[in-house]
Every structure is written in C-alpha cells, then in structure tokens.
Amino acid sequence: MRFVRLLSAVAVFYGLSYFFHALLQILSTMRFGGPEPLHLVFIGTNLVIGVVTLINGIGLLLAKKWSRVSWLATVTLLVLFHNFILLLTYWVGADLTQQLLNVVLIFFLAVISWAKLGDDEGKKYFR
C-alpha cells in the first residue's frame, strides 16, 4: 500500500506541474496579447493532461478501483504522446534534450506502474 501512496503523490505532483504550466501560459497570453490558435492547443493539452493526471492521482491516493485502470491507461497514453512530441521536436530541428528527458521519465513511470499495478497482485490494494 505504501507504493500506491507514493505513486499517487508522484501522479498528483505531475498533474499539478502540467496544470500550473497551463495557468502560467494563460497568464502570459493575457499579459502579452491574445493567444494564437496554436497556443490555445498547447494550453488546452496541458490543462487536459494536468486535470486528468491530478484526478488519477487523487483516485490512487483514495485507493479507488477505477483509478488503477484509469492511471494505467493515462500513463500509456502519456508515453505515446511524449514520443509523438519528441518526433515533432526532431522534425522541427529543435533541441531534443528536454523532450528526451520527458520521454525517459514518463517511460520509467509507466514501466513501474505497469509492473506494480498491472497484475492481480496490484488489484488487492483497491476497493
């Protein structure tokens, strides 16, 4: 159960980082002019990732049955999403360091989550 609590804390902090990043993007567009359509896509994506991950983290903290399945699906989609962003960053020719770090970190988070929560042993912690 200690692992689930630790994983929930990581998920909550991960979600909060995306949520606050989106809020800072909103504040910066308010200060420096209206957002362009592409900025709205970035802001919306960061808000969605932040809110979904925050809800999953709270569900894991409360050991709800739905949160286990939801977290595993979310972390899998995040791996795919960050790999897609890495590919776009490569095509644009920008620096890959930050995106590589994102891919590596979310990959390890996904591997750990699937290893601990993906089997029948991980189901026993949830009600």
Image: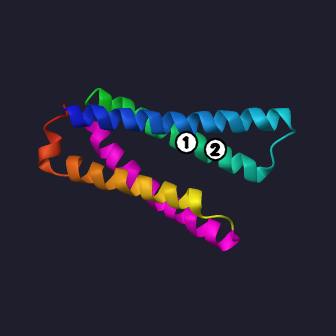
The residues tagged by marks 2 and 1 sit, at their Cα atoms, a distance apart of 6 Å
How many other residues sit within 10 Å of disc 1, few (<14), some (14-19) or many (≥20)? some
Q: Residue at x 63, y 66 (%)?
A: 89
Q: Quadrant of the N terminus?
A: top left
Q: Position of residue 48 (x, y in %)?
A: 55, 42
Q: Residue 26: within the magenta?
A: no
Q: Residue at x 60, y 64 (%)?
A: 96
Residue under label 1: 48
Q: Is residue 97 above or below residue 40?
A: below
Image quadrant where residue 23 sits: top right
Query: CB under 8 Å between callouts 2 and 1?
Result: yes
Image quadrant where residue 77 sits: bottom left
The amino acid on which the numbered mark 1 sits, given as a three-letter code, is Val
Q: Residue at x 43, y 33 (%)?
A: 12
Image quadrant where residue 28 sits: top right
Q: Position of residue 113 (x, y in %)?
A: 29, 49
Q: Is residue 25 above or below residue 116?
A: above
Report whether residue 81 is seen: no
Residue nearest the viewer, comparing 94 with 37: 94
Q: Position of residue 57 (x, y in %)?
A: 38, 34
Q: Position of residue 99 (x, y in %)?
A: 56, 59
The amino acid on which the numbered mark 2 sits, given as a three-letter code, is Gly
Q: Residue at x 26, y 53 (%)?
A: 114
Residue under label 2: 44
Q: Point out the stretch of residues depicted in magenta.
A: 65-93
Assign the magenta stretch its main secondary structure: helix
